[in-house]
Image: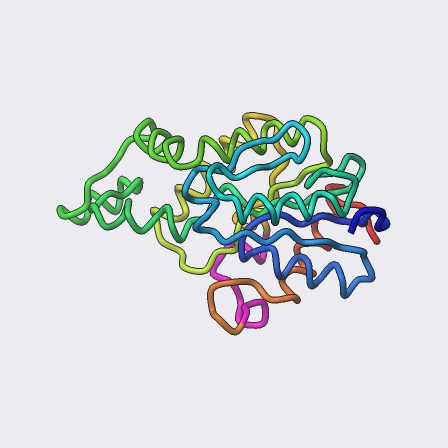
């Protein structure tokens, strides 16, 4: 509600927000979470908003949710001076399957060993990512200019060439725009399929213990203030 104290942390994104938010609360942080289903992020209608920070084209109910969240912290989803973790921009479970179903792979070695796979160039991979993610990249670029933002890439659930290549390229594209990214694919101990003790019951997300490990590493790297 308007007038509420400002949070210590804002977490915005898809289903991967839950583990980060739960871990922050467990550490005593005043964390707030804006969860938006990955389908809405993937449909490429999310836009930057000059006041709220975020809006959803042609989604009245979703815009009301965003407005209410923003109103509770001074009028912006991404309030200045408050660390924000964004778990959007990847959504690999929606981006990779159509790519793979067409028989495409960015793995030249894999393609050479399997005549049914069609190797794609880096330029085609970039074009595919840009087609589906350019609106989200624009949101992140604009938010990063004024907010204390870190993008959190999703954990590795299934290690396959297409998913790994797309995730790695998204990280590179975001960093090319000077957006800070925490990508588990670069982290010792997190750079393989998610360990059972860090996996949620649904088998496709990290749990609160995984969220705590991400927060710990962010704090060590100086990318997040300790509670």
Towards the viewer: 17 or 173 = 17
Query: Residue, x 28% and y 44% (percent of image)?
Result: 99
Vertical arrangement, residue 165 with respect to residue 209, above or below = above
Going by the picture, which residue comes out furthest to the left? 115
Query: Residue, x 54% and y 45% (percent of image)?
Result: 88
Most common secondary structure along the magenta stretch: loop
Please name the colour scheme applied to the rendered image: rainbow
Count of numbered badges drawn on the protein: 0
Query: Residue, x 66% and y 66% (percent of image)?
Result: 209
Query: Residue, x 63% and y 51% (percent of image)?
Result: 34
Horizontally, residue 1 falls left or right of residue 185, namely right
Towards the viewer: 208 or 184 = 208
Q: Quadrant of residue 174?
A: top right
Horizontally, residue 9 falls left or right of residue 109, namely right
Question: Does the magenta portion include 208?
Answer: no
Look at the image and give the residue range highlighted in magenta: 188-200
User: Residue 35 in the image: x percent, y percent?
Assistant: 59, 54
Horizontally, residue 177 falls left or right of residue 101, namely right
Vertical arrangement, residue 124 with respect to residue 69, above or below = above
User: Residue 38 in the image: x percent, y percent?
Assistant: 47, 51
Towards the viewer: 23 or 50 = 50
Question: Does the magenta portion include 192?
Answer: yes
User: Residue 51 in the image: x percent, y percent?
Assistant: 68, 31
| Quadrant in which the C terminus is drawn | bottom right
């Amino acid at each position: 509600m308007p007038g509420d104290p400002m949070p210590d942390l804002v977490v915005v994104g898809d289903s991967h927000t839950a583990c980060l938010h739960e871990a922050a609360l467990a550490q005593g942080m005043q964390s707030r979470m804006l969860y938006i289903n990955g389908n809405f992020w993937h449909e490429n209608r999310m836009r930057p908003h000059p006041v709220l920070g975020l809006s959803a084209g042609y989604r009245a109910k979703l815009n009301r949710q965003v407005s209410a969240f923003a109103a509770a912290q001074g009028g912006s989803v991404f309030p200045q001076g408050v660390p924000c973790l964004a778990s959007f921009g990847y959504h690999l479970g929606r981006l990779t399957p159509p790519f793979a179903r067409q028989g495409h792979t960015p793995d030249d070695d894999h393609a050479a060993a399997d005549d049914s796979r069609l190797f794609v160039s880096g330029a085609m991979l970039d074009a595919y990512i840009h087609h589906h993610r350019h609106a989200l990249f624009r949101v992140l670029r604009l938010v990063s200019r004024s907010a204390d933002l870190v993008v959190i890439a999703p954990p590795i659930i299934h290690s396959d060439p297409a998913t790994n290549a797309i995730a790695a390229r998204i990280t590179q594209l975001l960093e090319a725009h000077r957006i800070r990214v925490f990508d588990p694919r670069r982290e010792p101990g997190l750079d393989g399929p998610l360990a059972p003790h860090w996996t949620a019951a649904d088998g496709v997300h990290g749990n609160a213990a995984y969220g705590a490990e991400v927060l710990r590493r962010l704090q060590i790297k100086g990318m997040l203030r300790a509670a």
